[in-house]
Image (spheres, rainbow, N blue to C red):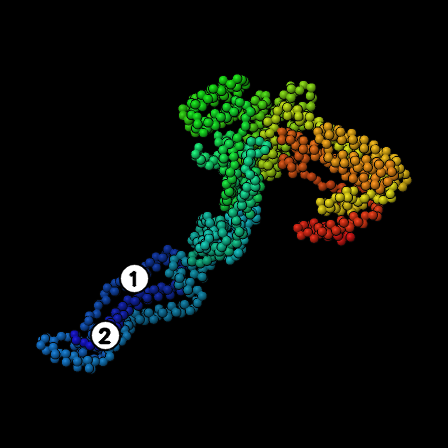
Amino acid sequence: MNISPQYKAQIKKALFLTKLNAWIEKCWPIVLSFLSIWGIYLCFGLLGIPQSLPDILRALLLAIISIGSIGLVIYQAKKIPYPTFQELLQRLEEHNKLAHQPLQTLYDTPVQTESKAVWNIHLQRIFEEFPHLKAGTPQICKGHYTLNRIGIVTVCMFAAFYVSHPHSSHSRLLSAVRPGYDDVTVPLPTLQAWIIPPSYSNSAPIYIKSNTETVSTNPKARLHIAFSNLKQSPEIINPESDIVLNQTSIQQLDHHQWQVEGSIQHSGILKIKARGRILASWTFNLPANLPPQIAWTGPVQKSPYDWKTEFPFKVTQHYGIESLHLSVTLPQNKDHTKENILSLTFPFGDRPKTITQTLYQDLTSNIWAGDKAQAVLTATDVTGQTTTSSKVDFILPKRQFTSLLAQKLDQIRQAYGTNKLSKDATIQALESLQNIPNAFRDYDLFLNYVGIICFLDNANNNSDAIKTQALTRLWELTIDTEERNNSSSEVARANMEIRAAQTSVQEQLDKMQRLGKDKITNQDRQELSKRLERLQNAVAQKMMAMAKQNAKDHPANNDGKEIQFKSTRSFQDMFQNMSKTIESGDMDKAMQQLEYTNQVLNTMRNATAEDLKKLEDQVKAQQDMKKLEQDLEALIKDQQTLLTQSYARQNRSVPLILRPNQDLNQLSTPELLKQITPQPSHTEGDKKLPSTQESAQKQQELIDRLQKLQEQMQAIAKQPIENLTLASNEMEDAYQSLLKKDDYKAAEAQEKALVNLQKGNQSAKQTMQKQAQQFSNFFPVFSAKNPQEDPSSDNKVSADKKKDPLGRSTDKENTEMDLSGNASSARHIQEELRKRADDPNRSNKDLDYIYRLLNMF
């Protein structure tokens, strides 16, 4: 066809639009039928009729409507006739009212090819009269009156129903097409929610009162939600960043009743959704939950009291510590691979927030003793977070033996344990020990030795279990041999019983600490009491054996029974204090007391009868020194009387501060206030004061008494007592001043003498305490008197109820005091109080007390 491009594009566009109109007209009944079906269903949905059906029936109805409407569309679509090209041209000519079918003429061809030129001229004439073609609009209303009426009625009903319920129409439409979803007109299910705080917080349950609430709680708190009138399972919606509720469990309790439980892990917004609606939206605020902080507080080293290794540490966490794991490994080197020496977990039932403690473990029995090892602590808090400490290097303590046989046994044990000796070679090495003279003089020791050889000889293989048991028995034989070498058989057997009793007590206490304060039963306490009684009996047996040996070695000594009684009684007090602590539930303190007791017992096992003799001598020296201290205190009192007389002869009151060079900064506030309180003058009105000559004679008597006390104290302490020589010189100066009738200089010398006498008395006590301290490691007779120094002590220092807040006695009547000459001292004290009031580091209680005192000036 020879058509101009301009007309060709116009005709092509018109044909396309005509074809589209034809298709729309043919598909319109199908679309109208599909929309009418769903429009009628949605109208019923706006009325709430489908929602009243059960979810299964509603889903079934939706499936029928969907399948039916889609099937109808497919069925009708297959019957649609495709318009031909001639039909499209004819429709376009009819719509544009073209006469003589010009469009069909354009697509005709001449019969005779010779007349092609004439045909082109014919086409040219047609184009000259060719109008602008229009495709028109589809005639969808023509011929479908019934369907159109149904569609119009459906749209009107839908609009009416939608406008009549503007707030609920949208949710009704959604619930109509989604089974299992409710619209807003359906009442919400009833829910009750509460939070059970974790046990470490010691908090009361929290009840959530509204569906939108902000709740502050702790990690690992348990959220409980109870639903009623709920047809299906609720849905938990966590935020995308963090999971707020973890370990969730959803259970159906009864018909339309559900229960939800979960653990709150992080802060965030938690939503509860059911049947397409948000039932609750809660915001949980959890405080910052930092992992535990753990650090070594000192070097890992051998304990000075025994062969145990000290592991000092400190661990803190805001909510509490659940457990602590100690791992000791031997790094790999050319001689051996990496070895696990120790792996222990210490649970803390009471979940303390701060633990500052020292773990003690005896690692000397390890075959790698003497090599370099590494220790690591791992702390786990109550929320499940863990922190690992830095690795610390230390040397595994190696026990030193004095017995030649014990040394040989230890060498064979280590060689066998490190695979340097085979099983057969180990048997031969053990048999060769019989060549040592008097090697196994005790029958029971020899039986243990032979038993180990027979055990290894009868073993079919050298498995790990056989090897471990043999090494354990060899170690026990080595320790028994060493103890028998240093003491009698009876004492050695007592030491073995003490070790066994210590181990049993330690195991029971570890078990009770794992259980925690609230889970310890009476049966556990009774079992611990039995084991403590066994330990107490073992200690008594040890003391009795040592006393017998001492009586045998020193027949003339009669003090052994007294020392035995005192030491046994001291151990009884320690065990009683431990039992009281366990009854109170303070397991951490009980473990400290047990460790202190173990230190004393472990060092006591090394004590010999000779040590008992030294202890008796020390007890006698303590008693003699105590008498001398009483004599010295009487001398100080007499010297105070002479000083009072010297001031009385000068018509002066007793000075407020007898120690003129005392640093007021070192005094506490009550002690400082004591210095403000003047002492009453001892001037007797009716009694005549002694003359200076009489005072000088008395002063000389005190000098002679002091010299005798010095000699006796020095003989007992085996060293001169500090300050007593200075006091003697000052008393000599006071004597010379009294001879010259110079009371002023005599008083000054007597003041200095009093200060040195008091310091000398204190120095004597400290000297004897230092000497007694070395025996406190063997026997608790000389244990610290201060409860803070002795963890096993349960005593507490009680306040003196006979003193007023200023430190003055209340059992005496108030006496008028002479304040003359004391203004200077009072000013110094007042200045010191003002300095303390300006100290910002003091507590509010202390500052309030100082301000009230300053207001008195």
Q: Residue at image x 78%, y 50%? A: 827
Rendered residue at 58%/23% (across/down): 486
Vertical side of 722 occupied by 407: above or below: above
User: Callout 1, which amino acid?
Assistant: Ile
Q: Percent x, y for residue 566?
A: 67, 28
Callout 1 crowding tier (Cα within 10 Å): few <14, some 14–19, many ≥20: few
Residue 208 pos. (x, y %): 53, 54
Residue under label 1: 70
**What residue would you read off at disc 2?**
9
Q: Quadrant of the N terminus?
A: bottom left
Q: Residue at x 57, y 46 (%)?
A: 202
**Residue in front for this viewpoint, 628 or 662:** 662
Q: Is residue 698 left or right of residue 323?
A: right
Residue 132, how many percent across, how many down? 24, 79
For the image, the number of numbered tags is 2
Residue 784 percent coordinates (x, y): 66, 34
Residue in view at x 64 percent, y 21 percent: 550
- Mark 1 vs mark 2, foreground winner is 2
When the figure is inspected, residue 781 is found, relative to residue 255, above or below; the finding is above
Q: Is residue 476 visible in the rendered structure shown here?
A: yes
Q: Quarter of the image holding residue 118?
A: bottom left
- Under mark 2, the amino acid is Ala
Cα gap from disc 1 to disc 2, whole angstroms: 38 Å
Identify which residue, 399 or 593, lies in the foreground: 399
